[in-house]
Image (cartoon, rainbow, N blue to C red):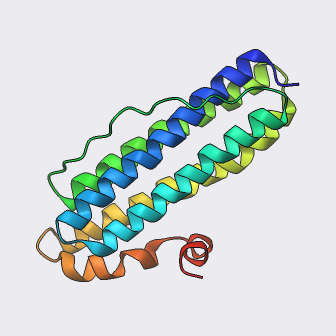
């Protein structure tokens, strides 16, 4: 049985993962509307991944005897100044999610909930990959500059990890 404190904080993470998916869909739509189909595809893929993270939390909460709640998600920002601005915001958001996951891990240790602690280790590792991936993209954007985005847009999908590329492009 999942403890109430752990159930509540995991339900908070359901909201955060769902919002992440909505945020990346909004960013993808911005990219499509601004002539960046490759960047849009990367962001749509990211949105799908975040939805899967949300579903992992829902399933876990319910399997442990808790009750997952599906909240309304706040409306994400839909306008950005540039591609670099989009990915700077992605990185800030991923750092926020990392902090949130770490907070849950800390609570599981306080509550001696080793089952949830073990469940969260996948997310801990995933956040390392997420942040590293976005930092690499920001580095590439800075190398090519804002006026040379055509090739970057064509190549961005190759910057995903091989496992994610296989999921999206079987």
- Estimate the x, y position of residue 17 in percent, counting from the top left: 53, 41
26 w.r.t. 119: above or below? below
- Estimate the x, y position of residue 7 in percent, counting from the top left: 72, 24
Q: Which residue lies furthest to the left in this view?
A: 147
Q: Residue furthest top?
A: 4
Asked if residue 134 lies left or right of residue 163, the reply is left
Q: Which residue is found at the position 41% from the left and 46% from the top? A: 22
Q: Which residue is found at the position 44% from the left and 74% from the top? A: 159
Count of residue discs: 0
Q: Quadrant of the N terminus?
A: top right
64 w.r.t. 38: above or below? above
Asked if residue 112 lies left or right of residue 141, the reply is right
Q: Is 54 in front, or is 129?
A: 54
Q: Which residue is found at the position 45% from the left and 44% from the top? A: 20
15 w.r.t. 56: above or below? above
Q: Is 102 in front, or is 31?
A: 31
- Estimate the x, y position of residue 89 in percent, counting from the top left: 31, 47
Q: Which residue is found at the position 19% from the left and 64% from the top? A: 33
Q: In which quarter of the image is the C terminus?
A: bottom right
- Estimate the x, y position of residue 23 in percent, counting from the top left: 37, 46
Asked if residue 50 lies left or right of residue 8, the reply is left
Asked if residue 88 lies left or right of residue 59, the reply is left
Q: Residue furthest right?
A: 1
């Amino acid at each position: 049985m999942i403890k109430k404190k752990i159930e509540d904080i995991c339900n908070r993470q359901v909201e955060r993962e769902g919002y992440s998916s909505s945020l990346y869909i909004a960013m993808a739509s911005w990219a499509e509307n601004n002539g960046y189909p490759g960047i849009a595809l990367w962001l749509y893929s990211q949105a799908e991944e975040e939805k899967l993270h949300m579903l992992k939390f829902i399933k876990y909460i319910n399997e442990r005897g808790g009750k997952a709640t599906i909240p309304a998600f706040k409306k994400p920002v839909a306008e950005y100044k540039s591609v670099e601005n989009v990915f700077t915001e992605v990185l800030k958001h991923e750092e926020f999610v990392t902090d949130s996951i770490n907070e849950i891990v800390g609570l599981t240790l306080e509550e001696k909930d080793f089952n949830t602690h073990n469940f969260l280790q996948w997310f801990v590792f995933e956040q390392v990959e997420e942040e590293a991936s976005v930092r690499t993209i920001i580095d590439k954007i800075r190398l090519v500059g804002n006026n040379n985005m055509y090739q970057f847009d064509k190549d961005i999908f190759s910057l995903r990890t091989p496992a994610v590329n296989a999921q999206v492009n079987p």
